[in-house]
Amino acid sequence: MAENLTIWTYDWVPQGPRGFVRDLRLRWAAEEAGLDYEIGAVPFEDRQPSHFERQPFGQIPFLTDGDISIFESGACLLHLARKSEVLMPRDARGEAETTEWVIAALNSVEMVSVPWWFLGLSGDRENGLSGWLDSRLAHIETVLSTREWLVGGRFTVADLLMADVLRIPQVRSRGDRPATEAYIRRLVARPAFEKAHADQLAHFAAADESRA
Ligand SMILES: N[C@@H](CCC(=O)N[C@@H](CS)C(=O)NCC(=O)O)C(=O)O
């Protein structure tokens, strides 16, 4: 069935973030759910008013679905999850728990891990946020020590997002957290992740060629 979905990313990014650019979250979800989608691209270097109209911070990803345009990767994932039970159970408890873990990935883990990572770029890997991050990672490790998936004993979009947040190399290699490491490995071994990852790399490699 034609879904009329377009996942928007940049036309090009530098090498560093490739494989981690957040359009991958949406590609991965669409692949898991078997949704048809196209990729749209907005300029990375010369951001246009039409881009800011759809993503007020000039970032990506955003998603268009017919005449709906939606930004924030978490909101886009929940939008996709409403289209497919593969991404979110249909019972009230399953929906509530998927939503809470999507928000937790963004607002309790990524809201610490990204600023921590950013401070580390200037060489200060042990910085003022290290203790806070370690505490969040320890609590996630406790949760993942007791269950394979975050919600309802099955894969959901919450796992996709949590794994994407946790797989940032500097975060992933921090401390000894075997349950978390096994969780990340399990998630990134999924064919839908592998396809989304390969497609993102190919998209930016093609951009290199056309710039050359
Ligand atoms: N909270 C946003 C963050 C989006 C974000 O950080 N996007 C990055 C690419 S992964 C970006 O556009 N960076 C360029 C910039 O911030 O100017 C989301 O989850 O969608």
Image: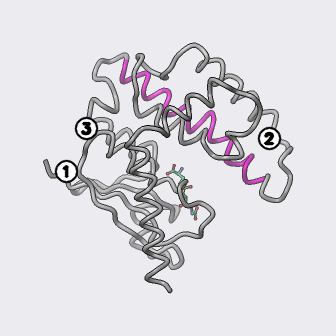
Residue 64 located within the stretch drawn in magenta: no
**Boundaries of the magenta span:** 94-119
Quickly name the residue at label 3.
Answer: 83
What residue appears at the point 69 percent right and 41 percent down from the top-left corner?
Answer: 171
Which secondary structure lies at badge 1?
loop
Mark 3 Cβ inside 8 Å of ligand 1: no
Quick check: is the Cβ at mark 2 less than 8 Å away from ligand 1? no
Residue drawn at (46%, 37%), measured in percent from left and top? 160
Labelled pair 1, 3 in contact (Cβ < 8 Å): yes
Q: Which of marks 3 and 2 is nearer the N terminus?
A: 3
Q: Which mark is residue 3?
A: 1
Furthest-top residue in view? 146
CA–CA distance in space, label 1 to label 3:
10 Å
Q: Where is residue 143 in the image (x, y as percent from the top left)?
A: 60, 18
Q: Residues within 10 Å of mark 1 (few under 14, many from 20)?
A: few
Distance from disc 3 to disc 2, alpha carbons, whole Å, reads 37 Å
Residue 152 point in image, percent of width and height: 41, 17
Q: Which of marks 2 and 1 is nearer the N terminus?
A: 1
- In x, y percent, where is residue 101? 50, 28
Q: In this view, does 42 lie to the left or right of 146?
A: left
| Residue 129, numbered label | 2
First in sequence: mark 1 vs mark 3: 1
- Up the image or down, 97 lies above or below 130; here it is above
Ligand 1 quadrant assignment: bottom right
